[in-house]
Amino acid sequence: MPAKYLQRAGVKGAAIHSLRHSFATQHIKKGTSLETIQQVMGHQDIRTTEAYTTLAREVLSKELQENAL
């Protein structure tokens, strides 16, 4: 069902999984706690949430290194 809405909206190359990943990534970059993201996404195990946010942490680490004082 959600794929139908993505198609109607003209969103190409996206799937629900990629939208969930983007949601988690953007929230971790803004400082939202993993526990909050876990609850919102409905994950019972925090490790599932951490899998979504690994890339976000790598990006943040790279940005910090590139912009070190």
Image (cartoon, rainbow, N blue to C red):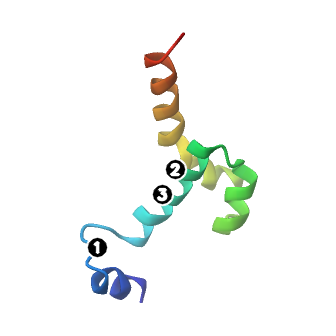
**Residue type at the position of mark 2:** Thr
Residue 20 point in image, percent of width and height: 50, 64
Q: Given contact means CB atoms under 8 Å apart, are the residues at marks 2 and 3 in contact?
A: yes
27 shown above or below 44: above
Task: Kindly indicate the quadrant of the structure image that contains residue 16.
Answer: bottom left
Q: Residue at label 1? A: 11
Q: Could you tell which of marks 3 and 1 lies nearer the N-terminus?
A: 1
On the question of residue 52 being in view, the answer is no
Q: Position of residue 15 (x, y in %)?
A: 36, 70
Q: Are marks 1 and 2 in contact (CB under 8 Å)?
A: no
Please give the name of the residue rendered at 32% of the width and 68% of the height, measured from the top-left corner: 14
User: In the figure, is residue 25 to the left or right of 4?
Assistant: right
Query: Can you identify the residue that label 3 sits on?
Result: 21
Q: Secondary structure at mark 1?
A: loop
**Distance of mark 3 from mark 1, alpha carbons?**
16 Å
Q: Secondary structure at mark 2?
A: helix
- Where does residue 58 sit, x and y in percent of width and height? 48, 32
Left or right of 36? Residue 25 is left
Position of residue 33 in the picture relative to residue 8 (left or right) = right
Q: Is residue 33 left or right of residue 28?
A: right
Give the number of callouts.
3
Residue at image x 52%, y 22%? 64
- Quickly name the residue at label 2: 25
- Whether 68 is drawn above or below 45: the answer is above
Going by the numbered disc 3, the residue's amino acid type is His
Residue type marked 1: Val
Q: Is 43 or 64 nearer to us in this picture? A: 64
Closer to the camera: disc 3 or disc 1? 1
Disc 3 and disc 1 in contact, CB within 8 angstroms: no
Q: In terms of sequence position, does the residue under pointer 1 or pointer 2 come before the other?
A: 1
